[in-house]
């Protein structure tokens, strides 16, 4: 309930935030605070400095960047959910943002915070991985772009260096059929297992599919075997392809479910996600 | 002076007097109390379930900024007049635990208090506490009851040489002899037998307000005041006197607004004693507020037990015998009433049915886990779960409809009043067919069964099930003589003082102590009705031993059926005295006075005197009979002659996903007989909350320890308290069968929901899957358990 003592600084700009991050060995960025503060209150995280980027201008909102949409890192889940550009060109991201946490969380939490936290049980990183999104990262030496595939490196670990700031997420415009299924025991819980499916239709079946999982390993993971098997599948073929969903995953066991049961859920949910995408 | 016709206020759904203050955040809770010069206590807790404490170094903590003192259990050992109190040694040979407020030699569960830090602020106290260095020697721990009973299991209390504390049985320990022994029935080859084996998981009460306390001291007078988040200020005064050695007249306990209890604040806690000891040492006020994570491991938990229940019945469905055995996990220490919790179900394992023979026994076992104690329903939900689940098993075995089997075996209403049931206690009233009828009126059973068939025929992966729980419970704890026979140390009476003030308002002091139930509303309604005064003119005071000296507090659905009857008698005393005053002033015989709607009338005349006028007259004492004491007040201590006996029928409809194991509760219908209802809104609230809490125990909530005794479900991310999104809207109805035991005809309602609902929900889940061969799903029925049951049935 009571965090260890820490210093607090308000960043005026991204550059200022980078400078503040570099001023302390264990500084952490804070935006909405909905991932970091609970850890601090449990004293599982004890940063000596919090750098608040919540008031940095220009980091919130969605803009059209040609074949891509640029989503500012400070865009709150509620805004992502209701953004007209996203709803038109990348509806899976908007829809999934509406499944994060509860209304309070969605009005405070930001997409950048969710991504930078690197929690494999979070929904949005999974969707971004399925979308082949790019993360735009700024550090003392300038900007770089990290593909989602390379961004999530471990449990609560990302490719961000300690003095780097995630500024933007670029997602492709897509006309693929889509579905995100979140299996949870209570409405406000993290996913026990989540599945994001983007399906290019072909003759009423699957042309190709991009599938990613929430909470099936230390990071969000692509279901590569199922994706390969899903290509060209229809009807019972979809069911057979979905059986391969757990290949390459390493799901956790906890009081909600064993790893084996998560593998089972991944199979059922993959089939349902693809079928529901096609039926949409 | 005007009088108002208020007769008929009983039974009206008046809005709760408590709510505007509570809903606008103006309620004064323990954490809101701040006293001049106050300092903060933080309790250092063991991270080990079982460890020898080789030493405690508090020097670094004491040197931290703002730290005032840091003490180990050994440092504080001489402060105690005795260990923490357990008031229920259930058998003559029970092995009791010695439970010091701060552990001295060993930590026996994760969360056991091992040191105390005092500092200028809450945060500084926590920071300093992190610097206390405890030299632990970790020892093997045992968390499971069956493991704890094995030879060579790690011992929780070394001196006893065993973890088995006691065995209590109806045969050997019940003061009310059962009708007949069950063994011959289970050897009768002509009878059908079924057996149910259930594991009831650990429950964590999660009152919205974590425990907290503030202790104030007047050093010159040696007087102490303890503000505490307690259900039981009066009982706590006595137990704290025994632990802390403060003279009873110099200890005042105040329970301010208390944000829920569910049994978890029905206790005499280490931290309460610690606060008094620290206030005494420092001569200044001290405060402590448990963090939620600490509350998870240091507040008593509920239930955890293994159950075996067997039924013997004729082929045509007449239940002949019931026998049950329970292994109950007591945790590391006996808290206030831990040993007797399973006993509160001891007479109810035959439910609302009327077999010929009965046996029940329970074993209390210590483990290296957080102590268990009362949890809403205490003993009765366990019994109801066992019999109601197994009645469904019997119905399947016999090929009978579960409702037909129940109706065939209900205790007939023709037996009442006062029928001695098979287990030996006497039930005062009930009508189990009528409550089931009322339940079915809301449900449309045939339509649910048709939908079930339709989905099965279609081969749908979303199947439907319906389950019932037709229950009986004993509440209104309890007649003092019965408690004596059960070896409970205290009595079961309660007190009320009703006083008419000079201006005609009424002050009602009650010995029961609310923590969310709405006593102020309910008692106002009763007293206003009885005395014929305005509802708004009644003030109800409670929860402060200096304001209400006598009481036994609130638990076991007793407040109305015991405390309410005390208030009824107190009102009767006022009316009797007022009658004498009126007869004196109006110069008539007392028998010539009618009293109605707050007004005395001389029969056959228009001469009247209102009770408010009488109150003023009795207070001024200008013109009252010779020798009469001034004032218009009545105090009554009421000891109930029997328990109160609610009953009812609950039904649950679920949809189960046979591919994922997900359960969606689609309907929940409850028809209860809780006797005469004072305020239907308050009663609905109790029923709704109870159903939700019981449903949580059936589907989501379970405290899980790993082998080393760590609580894996140590917060609300992993211990799944449901929200409004998880439960359906409830349909409730009532059948009022007035209790003949008390003049108001009331029973109790605080626990009916948790008593009835877990069995209804699990029966619905199993019913949904019965066509797949599933006979049981372990509760809470989370998706993996559901799927495992399906897979095992199909193997």
Image (spheres, grey):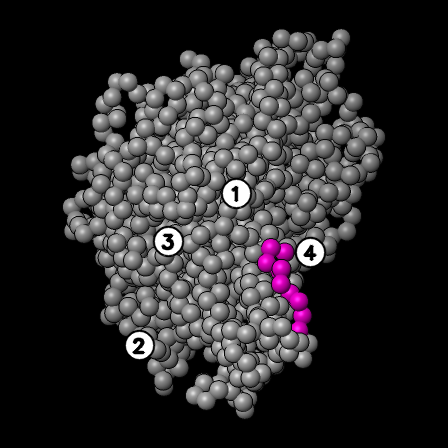
Q: Height in image: B738 above or below B232?
A: above
- Give SS at disc 2: loop
Image spot of residue B347 (x, y percent): 33, 42
Q: Is mark 1 in CB contact (under 8 Å) with mark 3?
A: no
Q: Is residue B794 magenta?
A: no
The mark closer to the camera, 2 or 3, is 3
Where disc 3 sits, the SS reads loop
Q: Residue at x 36, y 18 (%)?
A: B315
Disc 4: which chain? A
Q: Which residue is mark 1?
A: B672
Query: How crowded is the residue under tag 1: few (<14 C-alpha within 10 Å), some, or many (20+)?
Result: many
Residue at left 66%, top 27%?
Answer: A180
Spatial separation of the CA atoms under disc 4 and disc 2: 59 Å
Image disc number at residue A62: none
Whether residues under marks 1 and 2 lie with C-beta atoms below 8 angstroms apart, the answer is no
Sooner in the amino-acid sequence: mark 2 or mark 3: 2
Q: Which mark is in front, 4 or 2?
A: 2
Report which residue position mark 2 lands on.
Answer: B247
Residue B243 at x, y percent in the picture:
29, 67
């Amino acid at each position: 309930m009571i965090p260890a003592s820490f210093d607090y600084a308000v960043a005026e700009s991204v550059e200022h935030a980078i400078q503040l991050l570099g001023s302390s060995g264990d500084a952490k960025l804070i935006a909405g605070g909905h991932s970091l503060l609970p850890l601090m209150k449990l004293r599982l995280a004890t940063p000596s400095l919090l750098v608040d980027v919540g008031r940095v201008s220009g980091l919130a909102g969605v803009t059209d960047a040609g074949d891509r949409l640029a989503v500012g890192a400070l865009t709150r889940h509620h805004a992502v959910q209701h953004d007209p550009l996203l709803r038109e060109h990348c509806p899976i991201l908007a829809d999934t943002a509406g499944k994060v946490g509860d209304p309070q969380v969605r009005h405070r939490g930001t997409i950048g915070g969710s991504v930078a936290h690197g929690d494999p049980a979070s929904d949005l990183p999974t969707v971004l991985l399925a979308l082949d999104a790019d993360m735009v990262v700024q550090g003392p030496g300038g900007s770089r772009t990290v593909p989602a595939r390379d961004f999530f490196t471990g449990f609560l670990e990302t490719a961000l260096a300690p003095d780097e700031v995630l500024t933007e997420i670029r997602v492709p415009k897509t006309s693929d059929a889509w579905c995100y299924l979140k299996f949870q025991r209570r409405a406000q819980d993290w996913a026990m297992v989540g599945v994001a499916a983007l399906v290019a239709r072909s003759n009423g079946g699957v042309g190709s599919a991009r599938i990613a999982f929430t909470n099936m390993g230390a990071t969000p993971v692509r279901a590569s075997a199922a994706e390969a098997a899903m290509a060209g599948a229809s009807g019972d073929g979809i069911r057979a392809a979905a059986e391969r969903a757990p290949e390459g995953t390493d799901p956790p066991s906890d009081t909600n479910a064993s790893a084996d049961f998560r593998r089972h859920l991944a199979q059922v949910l993959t089939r349902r996600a693809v079928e529901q995408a096609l039926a949409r | 002076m005007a009088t108002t016709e208020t007769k008929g206020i009983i039974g009206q759904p008046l809005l709760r007097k408590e709510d505007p203050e509570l809903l606008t955040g103006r309620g004064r809770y323990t954490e809101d109390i701040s006293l001049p010069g106050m300092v903060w206590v933080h309790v250092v807790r063991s991270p080990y379930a079982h460890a020898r404490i080789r030493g405690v170094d508090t020097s670094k903590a004491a040197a931290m900024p703002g730290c005032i003192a840091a003490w180990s259990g050994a440092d504080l050992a001489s402060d105690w007049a005795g260990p923490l109190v357990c008031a229920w040694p259930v058998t003559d040979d029970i092995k009791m635990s010695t439970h010091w407020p701060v552990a001295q030699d060993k930590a026996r569960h994760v969360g056991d208090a091992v040191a105390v830090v005092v500092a200028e602020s809450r945060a500084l106290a926590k920071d300093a506490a992190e610097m206390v260095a405890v030299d632990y020697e970790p020892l093997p721990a045992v968390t499971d009851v069956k493991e704890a009973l094995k030879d060579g299991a790690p011992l929780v209390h070394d001196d006893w040489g065993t973890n088995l504390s006691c065995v209590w049985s109806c045969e050997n320990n019940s003061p009310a002899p059962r009708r007949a022994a069950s063994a011959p029935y289970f050897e009768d080859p002509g009878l059908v037998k079924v057996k149910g084996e259930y594991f009831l998981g650990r429950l964590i009460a999660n009152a919205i307000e974590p425990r907290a306390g503030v202790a104030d001291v007047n050093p010159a007078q040696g007087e102490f005041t303890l503000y505490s988040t307690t259900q039981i200020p009066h009982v706590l005064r006595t137990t704290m006197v025994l632990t802390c050695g403060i003279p009873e007249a110099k200890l005042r306990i105040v329970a301010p607004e208390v944000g829920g209890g569910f049994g978890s604040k029905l206790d005499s806690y280490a931290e309460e004693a610690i606060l008094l000891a620290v206030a005494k040492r420092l001569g200044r006020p001290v405060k402590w507020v448990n963090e939620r994570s600490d509350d998870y491991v240091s507040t008593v938990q509920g239930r955890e037990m293994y159950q075996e229940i067997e039924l013997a019945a004729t082929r045509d469905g007449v239940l002949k015998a019931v026998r049950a055995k329970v292994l109950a996990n007591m945790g590391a220490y006996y808290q206030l009433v831990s040993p007797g919790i399973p006993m509160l179900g001891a007479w109810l394992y035959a439910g609302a049915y009327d077999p010929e023979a009965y046996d029940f026994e329970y074993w209390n076992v210590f483990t290296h886990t957080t102590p268990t104690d009362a949890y809403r329903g205490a003993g009765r939900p366990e019994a109801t779960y066992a019999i109601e689940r197994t009645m469904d098993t019997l119905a399947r075995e016999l090929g009978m409809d579960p409702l037909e089997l129940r109706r065939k075996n209900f205790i007939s209403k023709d037996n009442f009043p006062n029928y001695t049931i098979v287990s030996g206690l006497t039930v005062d009233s009930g009508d189990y067919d009528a409550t089931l009828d009322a339940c079915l009126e809301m449900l449309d059973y045939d339509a649910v069964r048709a939908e079930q068939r339709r989905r099965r025929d279609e081969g749908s992966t979303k199947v439907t099930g319906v389950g019932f729980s037709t229950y009986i419970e004993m509440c209104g704890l309890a007649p003092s003589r019965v408690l004596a026979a059960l070896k409970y140390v205290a009595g079961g009476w309660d007190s009320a003082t009703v006083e008419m003030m000079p201006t005609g308002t009424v002050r009602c002091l009650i010995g029961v102590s609310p923590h969310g139930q709405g006593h102020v509303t309910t008692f106002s309604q009763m007293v206003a009705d009885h005395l014929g005064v305005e509802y708004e003119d009644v003030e109800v005071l409670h929860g402060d031993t200096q304001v209400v000296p006598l009481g036994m507090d609130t638990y076991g659905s007793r407040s109305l059926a015991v405390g309410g009857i005390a208030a009824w008698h107190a009102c009767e005393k006022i009316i009797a005295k007022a009658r004498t005053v009126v007869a004196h002033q109006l110069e008539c015989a007392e028998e010539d006075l009618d009293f109605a709607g707050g007004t005395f009338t001389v029969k056959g005349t228009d001469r009247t005197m209102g009770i408010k006028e009488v109150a003023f007259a009795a207070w001024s004492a200008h013109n009252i009979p010779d020798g009469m004491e001034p004032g218009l007040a009545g105090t009554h201590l009421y000891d109930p002659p029997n328990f109160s006996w609610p009953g009812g029928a609950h039904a649950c409809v679920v949809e189960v996903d046979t591919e994922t194991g997900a359960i969606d509760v689609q309907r929940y219908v409850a028809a209860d007989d809780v006797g005469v209802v004072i305020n239907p809104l308050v009663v609905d609230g109790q029923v709704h909350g109870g159903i939700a809490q019981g449903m949580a125990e059936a589907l989501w909530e379970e405290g899980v320890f790993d082998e080393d005794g760590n609580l894996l479900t140590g917060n609300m991310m992993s211990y799944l308290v449901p929200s409004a999104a998880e439960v359906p809207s409830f349909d409730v109805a009532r059948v009022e069968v007035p209790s003949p035991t008390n003049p108001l005809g009331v029973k109790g309602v605080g626990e009916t929901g948790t008593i009835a609902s877990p069995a209804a929900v699990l029966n619905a889940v199993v019913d949904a899957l019965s066509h797949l061969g599933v006979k049981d799903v372990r509760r809470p029925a989370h998706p993996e358990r559901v799927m495992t049951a399906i897979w095992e049935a199909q193997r």
